[in-house]
Amino acid sequence: MALLNPKTETFAEFDPRTQALLRSVVDFFETKGKQALTADAHRAEWYEDWMEFLAESRVLAYLATPKAHAGNDSDKRWDTAFISRFNEITGFYGSQYWYAWGVSTLGLATIWQSENAKAHARAAEELDRGGILGFGLSEQAHGADIYATDMLLTPDGAGGFTATGSKYYIGNGNVARLVPTIGRRTDLEGPDAYVWFLVDSRHPNYRLVKNIIHGQNFVSAYDLADYPVTAEDVLHTGRKAFDAALAAVNCGKFNIGMVALGIVQHCFYETINQAAGKILFGHPVTDFGQVRQILCDAYVRMHAMRLYHERAIDYMRCSTPEDRRFVLFNSIGKMKVTREAERVYRELSDVISAKGFEKDTYFATARGTIDSMPRLEGTAHVNMALTLKFMASFLFDPAPLPPVPVRRDPGDDESLFRQPGAAGLGKVRFADWRLAYDKYRHLPNVALFVEQAERFTGFATEAPATEAQLADLDYQLAVGELFTLLPYGQLILEQAALTGATEDIVDSIFETFVRDFSRYALDVFGKPSSTVAQQHWALAVIRKPEPDEQRSARLWDEVRGHADAYAMNP
């Protein structure tokens, strides 16, 4: 599968019910049409028609209700593969439409992790009603710093509390009935003081303050004033409250990679349609070498994004409390795939040029949202720092783990709600990353990249970090860029082998990786703190990708074939 074409996509990997639900999402947007879609976006109009569709189709109930809470409806489940395709479609038509679900993911994950059966029933009922949820974590003064929360819970003497405080940056606060919220008890100190509790926005002590952004989404500020919290409202307490927040974010941030891919795929169609039909100096714009290079690079990077994320789905679905490899692959998906999408968008901007600012283009509406993708659910830097926790285990301590199977069955990924605490990530084990590369070493750019990767495994001994560098996050992040390419490439090659991706595509992907690795090495070279040994190492691993004119010509023919393949209904 190259690019998503909603008009021809059959979603054949899924069961018939799921296919029909995904098709109904496409039909909603194509029936709405581009003119109404873009006009609503520029007017920052709340998407009431989307809310009505969600209520009528109940698509969220079918993709986000674990079987344990689904009653007699066997088609309901929490299905990461189903969710990912929903994310891609909504990103393709407008990430603002995804956002309503994206925030709901966090709220639901917090509830499904709890042992509160009444809260489970309330959430399942809300999904069945077609409702969406909030996630009351962030505050204006502290952001997502849970330890510093000013939402205070005072014991009421009857086994419950009264909650008073403010939350900020909280999506869906205008319509979400259920808003899981975290606060701190006034009678306890330290980790034992934290409590997740369920807030009903219809209660008179819930006060919606405002939407803090200009856009179709409602990113709210709300206050609680002596809000009564009963035992039936409590979801998590103590250290578990902190762990539940991180686990919810692990679920939520996996959404974002496919949203970003959806965005840039639509932008690619608009760009190549414009370029193929525009005559400049007597030639179609696609005749210009730099335009061909940009379009091919964008196409190849989108292929890499899809291959990576599709394989990461399998690791996500096969995770257990004992097998937590998905945390690394999840963080890379959030950090790497979204930034690759940003890069593709910027490059396409140089081709679509002035048309990308026209108010009736999808490209113009995407301009305001593509930047947000790497910065939701933890910034790219936060997720990069998380990946570094796995580096030693990934590189130097492989385990004989069984292959991870493809998972597109209508199964229930309930293990995501049984994640252990955040400690111990450095002990997570991985299979030998070289195994995926061995199948493709005959391709020249894969071979070059493996050479760079092997040199990276010796970096710590050839050019060890100084004590100051070990505490310098800027330096560590530069090293992280180099490391990230190894697991990113591993999952791409695993998925390429599973799907039969052409060797032209695979070698083209690794042509970009050789170039990227060299650029990241040069960044390490240029760091103010880099030692002489580190500078020598960095220069020694720079490689020029292996060109192939015939492969490039075949790739361009494939890319050019997407001109006029898709345009949204007007």
Image (spheres, rainbow, N blue to C red):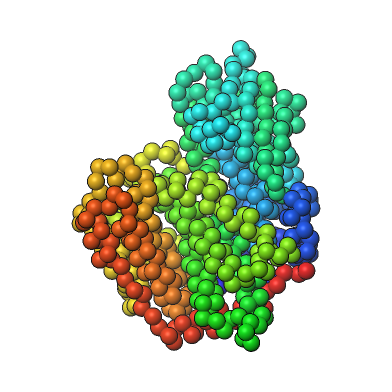
Q: Where is residue 142 in the image (x, y as percent from the top left)?
A: 53, 32
* Residue 317 vertical placement versus 290 (above, below): above
> Can residue 96 be seen in this snapshot?
yes
Query: Furthest-top residue in view?
Result: 157
Q: Establish if 328 lies above or below 423.
A: below
Which image quarter is the N terminus in? bottom right
Query: Could you tell me which residue is drawn at 32 percent across and 53 percent down?
Result: 527
Q: Horizontally, is 325 left or right of 179 in the view?
A: left
Is 237 situated left or right of 528 in this image?
right
List the single residue furthest toward the front: 281
Residue 563 in view, yes or no: no
User: Foreground: 346 or 402?
Assistant: 346
Q: How many marks?
A: 0
**What residue is drawn where x is 78% and y is 64%?**
35
On the image, which quarter does residue 284 sit in?
bottom right
Horizontal and vertical percent for residue 213? 67, 44
Left or right, 75 with respect to 545, comes to: right
Q: Is residue 467 above or below residue 494?
A: above
Q: Residue 358 location in percent, x, y?
A: 71, 65
For the point 62% across and 19% down, the residue is: 161
Displayed quadrant of residue 108: top right
* Rendered residue at 50%/58% (across/down): 339
Q: Which quadrant would the C terminus be assigned to in this image?
A: bottom right
